[in-house]
Amino acid sequence: MMKRTVLFLLAPFLLTSGAVLAQDGNNPVNYSNLALQFSEQSFNGDAGTGLFPSVASAHGYGSFVDNPATVGLIEKNYFSFSLANNRYEFENSYLGNTLSSEDNSTSLGNIGFVYKLPTKQGSFVIGGGYNSTSNQKGLAHLSARNNESTITDQFKDPASDYYDIAFNAYAIDWGDVDSTYLESIFRIGLPNFPGITQEADISYKINMGEYSAFFGTEFQENLFLGISAGLTTGNYTYRRDFLEVDDQNDYNYNFIPSDTPGDSTDIDNILTHDEIDADIFGFTVRTGLLYKVSQNFNVGLSYQIPSTLVVREGYYSSIKTELDDGSTPFESDFASEVDYEYRINKPGQLNVGIALIDIGGFDLSVSGEFINYSNLSLDLIKGNDLNFNDEVEIRDQEEELDSFMKENYNSVVNYKAGLGYQITGLIKLKAGYAFFEGKSEVYEADRNVFSGGLTANITKNIVLDLTGQYSFWDDRSVAYSYYDFDTGQNRAETISHDITNTRILAGVRFLF
């Protein structure tokens, strides 16, 4: 169990040892970064709602995510169903070489219902179902000549969990005749590192959603109250294949015994493979108020209560070293014996918004979301069967991670604006913009999202919702990090990402 913990817990501190490295990118698998990603809710799978602000007005089933009180404004009963298509395009730059990659997938956006109960006055609307709340992907293809470092530099650190399997796989070996220290196989006996060709595929995927029940009611004239409660579920996958190839035959020393008796050979390539798979569970509660100031003007306020996500993960890593003459490769690996559990304590979220309703056929809604990500914290002990020494070690690392997040993660205000126009009695056009402020001082850039869509009555009892979203941002991530024993510094090889995301949401509402 300790391998994954030790391997990645210390990664964020490789980026804080000096000003040069402080802004150098995120490690996609360290726990502080995952806490930030799992806590983000920047997607609403309901095609009618999307990212159109619903703190002071209702756009569809998914409006409860912004403010459950807006559900009380819904006048008709319906069953809602949506699909979401996501297309990501990446331009990844590594060591001066840029490669493009893309990913296209379709998934369930939402499925649920809302029902207005009969009342003598006011309203009481209930609902429930599933709604997608996060869809994040990263994909990087790398190909470059590295004349400064090799991934095997990471393995020679005794604190690295690759240490044992790298030795078994001949990725590192004794650096001197007295066997006093281990060294990268690509540096032994050489006055200068000649370089190595690196090829890699690195990817991650996060999908999260919420099974919810909610209600909104006008409990006093023009004053609405709403509450929602939901079970958050999701999964995370990470894959890294990192290949280093001696394609220029720089390491032609014939120092490894061959399969042929009496012969010897050397390294042709080393492949490092990593897998992480995690399941995510949590519970989310929201409450909100909405006040109809007039027939055409609403104000809304909602709060998502701080909550805890429970993450259970398994992991696997291997190293395979192939030889020049085709002799039997050296291989070694490690894997989690049982799933490791950790917990993420999420901050609360405060939403405020206003809405203008039916002003010459136009609707306008604006909202702001306040979230203090510096309040994120981790519990890496609860839920695991640890011995005393492991618990002491992990508690120290947990405190360092919490301190890192408190110092480097931001309080943010996200803004959303939406404009709708009823062009006929059957068709309404919508346009929107959302701004998501950068959450981290280390790597995260601001994000802009532009939206457009329509709502159309296909028949008396069927409503079609279509929404398109386009967003773009820059990012940086760590391909691998290592400790430079010669200079006494922590270093990292990083990737620059230019990312665009095009998302199409298509849904239908069946009125009943």
Image (cartoon, rainbow, N blue to C red):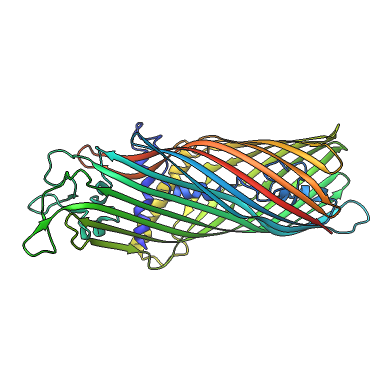
Q: Position of residue 378 (x, y in %)?
A: 48, 52
Tell me if residue 50 comes above or below residue 211 in the rendering: above
Query: Of all residues shown, which one is farthest toward the right?
Result: 120
Asked whether, in this view, residue 178 is left or right of residue 67, the answer is left
Q: In the figure, residue 143 lies in which quadrant?
A: top left
Residue 239 image position (x, y, % from top left)? 41, 54
Left or right position of 445 against 218? left
Question: Percent position (x, y) of residue 7?
Answer: 34, 53
Residue 154 image position (x, y, % from top left): 27, 48
Residue visible at 29% across and 54% down in the picture: 271
Q: Residue at x 25, y 46 (%)?
A: 153
Q: Is residue 262 visible?
A: yes
Q: Is residue 302 above or below residue 128?
A: above
- The answer to whether one can see residue 213 in this image is no
Which quarter of the rendered picture does the C terminus lie within? bottom right
Q: Which of the pair 448/313 is nearer the observer? A: 448
Please indicate whether residue 426 sits to the left or right of residue 211 in the image. Answer: right
Q: Which of the two residues, 361 or 490, is positioned nearer the viewer here?
A: 361
| The N terminus, quarter of image | bottom left
Q: Quadrant of residue 413?
A: top right
Front residue (pair 210, 349): 210
Q: Nearer the viewer, residue 118 or 424?
A: 424
Number of numbered markers: 0
